[in-house]
């Protein structure tokens, strides 16, 4: 029998640093796997050997804002070609810690990149392609900053930014969610992990398994 496997779905997690994405991503991956799906868990910047090298530069090397935006999209181009598209076509689901909404939030919102330049890069790198579902973890920057400080890890170039930067990033995420309400769900992330997890499970079930 010539049965082709259905194309996989692409789910992305977004939010300011310390929003609490990491553990919830693990829960969603486990949930999908429990349904018998093959899941590829990945992240941006990164996700490929080249992308991880670019990530090192992006997180630690000072650079011009437009260099930063183009390197984010360069890493993404590689990620799409080498990993995301092949996985989806093979029927795997792809769950990524960040994607293009992060460039809108951090580079346009946080750093002030020209929105037209962002759109040009987005249209070049993935014309007509967006995640099937994006979860934006939303919380006050001071709460997120306290969580990041508690981890005890050395902060990277982004995590060292001040509260007003993260206020702008947060606002840009909310603006982006407003522009694509069918795709982007905003999650109140200043709650207990179990509550957040239950809400996400309900969203995923409603969106994909109803
Ligand atoms: N809902 C939550 N309430 C309180 N602390 C949390 C919550 N979710 C995550 N944390 C803690 O906050 C820190 C950052 O979480 P993490 O998942 O790494 O965030 P992100 O991946 O969004 O940067 C970790 O120490 C984690 O244990
Ligand atoms: C994908 C992406 C990430 N970033 C930033 C956001 C984060 O501060 C950083 C790395 O993301 P992340 O993996 O969430 O950091 P961590 O592992 O420390 O939780 O890169 C951008 O500024 N633009 C982008 O397009």
Image (cartoon, rainbow, N blue to C red):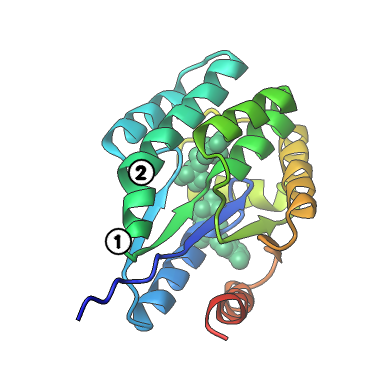
Quadrant for the N terminus, please.
Answer: bottom left
Asked which quadrant contains residue 199, the reply is bottom right
Number of the label disc, if any, that sits on residue 17 = none
Number of the label disc, if any, that sits on residue 47 = 2
Quadrant for the C terminus, please.
Answer: bottom right
The answer to whether the beta carbon of the residue marked 1 is less than 8 Å from any atom of ligand 2 is no
Asked which quadrant contains residue 37, the reply is bottom left
Number of the label disc, if any, that sits on residue 90 = 1
The x and y percentages for residue 72 are: 50, 30
Foreground residue among 99 and 168: 99
Residue 166 seen in this snapshot = yes
Kindly give the residue lying farthest to the front in the view shown.
2
The x and y percentages for residue 198 are: 60, 80
The x and y percentages for residue 22 are: 48, 58
Foreground residue among 163 and 65: 65
Question: Which residue corresponds to the image point at 43% horizontal and 78% vertical from the top-left?
Answer: 31
Does 154 sit left or right of 128 as displayed? left
- 37 up-or-down from 108: above or below: below
The x and y percentages for residue 174 are: 77, 50
Residue 112 seen in this snapshot = no
Asked which quadrant contains residue 102, the reply is top right
Task: Report helix, strand or loop for mark 1.
Answer: loop
């Amino acid at each position: 029998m010539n049965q082709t496997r259905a194309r996989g779905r692409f789910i992305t997690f977004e939010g300011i640093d310390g929003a609490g994405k990491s553990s919830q991503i693990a829960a969603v991956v486990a949930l999908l796997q429990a349904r018998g799906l093959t899941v590829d868990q990945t992240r941006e910047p990164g996700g490929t050997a080249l992308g991880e090298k670019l990530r090192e530069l992006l997180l630690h090397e000072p650079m011009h804002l437009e260099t930063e935006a183009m390197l984010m999209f360069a890493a993404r181009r590689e990620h799409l070609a080498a990993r995301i598209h092949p996985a989806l076509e093979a029927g795997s689901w792809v769950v990524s810690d960040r994607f293009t909404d992060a460039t809108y939030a951090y580079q346009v919102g946080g750093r002030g990149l020209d929105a037209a330049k962002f759109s040009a890069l987005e249209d070049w790198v993935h014309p007509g392609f967006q995640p099937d579902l994006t979860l934006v973890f939303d919380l006050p920057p001071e709460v997120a900053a306290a969580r990041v400080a508690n981890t005890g890890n050395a902060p990277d170039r982004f995590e060292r930014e001040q509260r007003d930067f993260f206020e702008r990033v947060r606002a840009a995420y909310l603006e982006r969610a407003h522009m694509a309400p069918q795709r982007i769900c905003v999650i109140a992330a200043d709650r207990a992990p179990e509550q957040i997890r239950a809400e996400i499970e309900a969203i995923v079930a409603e969106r994909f398994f109803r």
